[in-house]
Amino acid sequence: MTLARQIQALRKEKGLSQEELGEKLGVARQSVSKWESGATVPELDKLIAMSRLFGVSVGSILGLEETGEPERELTERELEALEAIAGRLTPPEAEPKKRKRWPYALAALVVAAALGALLGRINGLENQIQGLRSNLSDVQNTVSREVGSIGSQVRRILEEQNRVTAGEGYEVTGMDLLNNKVTFALTATPREYREGMRAVFSAVGDFEAVEVPGVLGAGQTFTGSLTCPLTDDITLSVGFVTEESTVTQQLGQEGYLLSGAQLDMRGDLSWTVSYRDGVGSLTRLQAGVWEAGSGWYHDGSEWRELTLEKAELRLWKNDAVVWSEAREELERGLAVEELSIPTEGLEPAPGDRLILSVRYTDTAGRETETFLDGFWITQEKEPKRIDPREETGSAYPWE
């Protein structure tokens, strides 16, 4: 499991929102969002704080494991080699002379013992070499970490020297999910203020850039409120404008707002086909639906969890709905398991598709239909499972 997914799993297991985890760690909710989306990684002190908060080791959060390898003993092949040498040094059984066989046997034992000791020394040397290799690897890793740390420090120093702000920040102050909009409150203080200086805040993403003028306030700090389309990749910046030039500073990035404000619905559709006289007919349909992940959104006053208000299961045959049923348990966060769907009158023919979907309204007022699972009838009248979203990538599986 990646570091981002591990942090998200531990947070949810603890029953914390991103904002609550941020408060316990002394960081903004945006920082937690960036950790969980993989855009950034937490500092070491934050990892240590999370290990104490979640009751796990730092290595567990990072997904690291320690392994050990027992010392090597003589293998079966080496033991067989010793026995073979001893056999070759022992004289043949023809015309035995018992009183003269013991010198050969003794010599064989001496050679075998010497060879065993030699193999033991070789094994010892191999273990020492393996230990040296391990130590060398540790040294290389340490050097790499030190070089990486120095490089990071140099980059931070250079970035700090090139910064045009003495302070900056932003936060989400509202999300209009019905119209797919998000509003930010932004602040920026120039490192060197000049009389007549103006500030322009901007948002850039997979939409036309949005700009708003900054309002100069106390401490030569500019503030602004900016509303832009809600997407998963928004970059916020400020530009300080004078008569001579315009200098720009990035304030931050949001890469998880839209995905984080979605419900992840999952489900499956199973079936049974019975054959009589070589003709197949659909005799059973069962559905299962559950919510795999909840979302979060800012309603203008606080961050709220996104849940279901209404939910209806629907069965499509090609481009028409042939069955539907409202399910209140989904609204309570429960799963629908082994729900029987009537098969009378369906009579799918080769080429027909049956698709299970869920149409729901969330707490933000959005109505969404998600296609979950289905199958189509082949020329041999055998059903073949399909994934509507993966097969077509469109809103409707038959388009």
Image (spheres, rainbow, N blue to C red):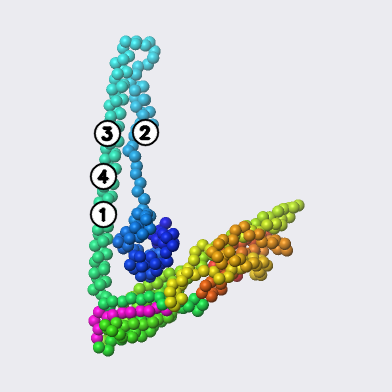
Name the residue tied to disc 2. 75
Label 2 to label 4: alpha-carbon separation: 23 Å
Label 2 to label 3: alpha-carbon separation: 14 Å
Q: Amino acid at mark 4?
A: Leu
Name the residue tied to disc 1. 142
Name the residue tied to disc 4. 132
Q: Quadrant of residue 326?
A: bottom right
Q: Earlier in the sequence, mark 3 or mark 4?
A: 3
Q: Nearer the viewer, residue 387 or 40?
A: 40
Density class for disc 3 (Cα within 10 Å; few <14, some 14-19, many ≥20) is: few
User: Of the residues tagged 1 and 4, which is closer to the observer?
Assistant: 1
Q: Amino acid at mark 2?
A: Thr
116 on left or right of 366? left
Q: Which residues are magenta?
A: 183-194
Label 1 to label 3: alpha-carbon separation: 31 Å
Q: Amino acid at mark 3?
A: Arg
Element at label 4: helix
Name the residue tied to disc 3. 121
Can residue 234 be seen at all in this image of the molecule? Answer: yes
Q: Position of residue 374 (x, y in %)?
A: 61, 62
Asked if residue 247 is among those painted magenta in the image, a careful observer would answer no
Q: Position of residue 364 (x, y in %)?
A: 51, 74
